[in-house]
Image (spheres, grey):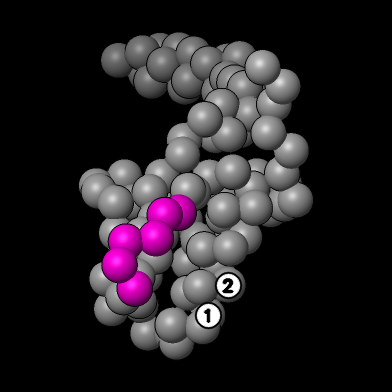
Amino acid sequence: MPAVETKHDVFRAIADPTRRRILTLLTEKEMSITSITKRFPITRTAVNKHLMILTDAGLVASRKSGREMRFKLQPEPLKEVQQWVSMFEKYWDDKLSSLRQYVESDE
């Protein structure tokens, strides 16, 4: 099965703090745009723009339910972020080992 082509880069989509908060909300449950908008001090139009960027990046899926759109998290594209970050884990491990050695040497 071919990968779904996205219009927006996952890294750019999650770079914005509002979009990260929206993703966090959607980890709990599927939500309507009205429910999401109530959690932010911005307009429904602004929330909708954020949701469209997240949808274009493949991070959010939407469906129509009555007159409202409902949104849910699609976490699969975040694997790309996880893989990229994991390349740097060895540096964190090295720093933590150095810190451990430093702390233990003072004892």
Q: Which residue is mark 1?
A: 46
The amino acid pointed to by label 2 is Lys
The residue that appears at 27% across and 71% down in the rendered structure is 35
Determine contact: label 2, label 1, CB under 8 Å.
Answer: yes
Q: Which label sits on residue 36?
A: none
The residue range painted magenta reads: 62-67
Please state which of residues 18 and 102 is positioned toward the viewer in this rendering.
Answer: 18
Between 35 and 19, the residue placed more toward the observer is 35
Quadrant location of the N terminus in the rendered image: top right
What is the secondary structure assignment of the residue under circle 2?
Answer: helix
Question: Badge 1, how many Cα within 10 Å: few under 14, some, many 20+?
Answer: some
Q: Which residue is mark 2?
A: 49
> Would you place residue 27 above or below residue 80 in this image?
below
| Residue 7 image offset from top left, x and y in percent | 75, 51
Which percent across, then down, holds residue 61?
47, 48
In this rendering, does residue 86 appear at all? yes
Task: State whether residue 15 appears in this view.
Answer: no
Task: Identify the secondary structure beneath mark 1.
Answer: helix
Determine the image quadrant of residue 83: top right
Residue 81 location, quadrant: top right
**Marks 2 and 1, Cα distance to the nearest angstrom?**
5 Å
* Residue 14 in the image: above or below residue 97: below
Residue that appears at 46% across and 39% down? 74
Residue type at mark 1 is Ala
Residue 64 is inside the magenta segment? yes
